[in-house]
Amino acid sequence: MTALFAKTPDGVRLFIRVLPGAGRNAIAGTAEDADGQNFLKVMVTAAPENGKANAAVIKLLSKTWKLPKSAIRVVSGAANRRKTLEITGD
């Protein structure tokens, strides 16, 4: 089993799975894939086109965790449902 997040010098890396086109924007809990990787499930109403779902994920997480949107960025998986986010700060 792999952790849901990894510490970095500037903050943390968070592993997520995005469910675009959902009925609502919400964090839907955690899950584990067949390889043992844990991830946070994030539902967004935005379509997976032109970065709209990525922007919706960043907006949802920044609002939920009271962080500036600039503190969250996609570092891998921009065109995939599985993504790695880097969250900077304390």
Image (cartoon, rainbow, N blue to C red):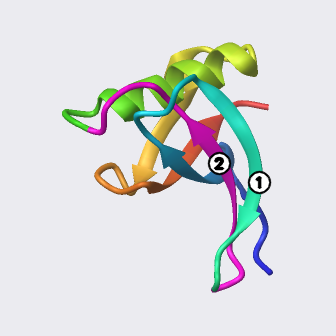
| Residues tagged 1 and 2 counted as in contact (Cβ below 8 A) | yes
Residue at x-position 44% and y-position 43% = 74
User: What residue range appears in magenta?
Assistant: 35-48
Mark 1 burial class by Cα count in 10 Å: few <14, some 14-19, many 20+: few
Residue positioned most to the front: 23
Circle 2 sits in a helix, a strand or a loop, which is it? strand
Residue positioned most to the bottom: 35
Residue at x-position 31% and y-position 32% = 47
Where is the N terminus found, in terms of image quarters?
bottom right
Numbered badge on residue 30: 1
Q: Is residue 41 magenta?
A: yes
Q: Is residue 74 magenta?
A: no
How much space separates mark 1 and mark 2, taking CA atoms? 6 Å
Numbered badge on residue 10: none
Which amino acid does the dot numbered 2 rest on? Lys
Residue at x-position 65% and y-position 75% = 33
Q: Left or right of 5: which side holds 85? A: left
Mark sitting earlier along the chain (1/2): 1
Report the residue marked by disc 2.
41
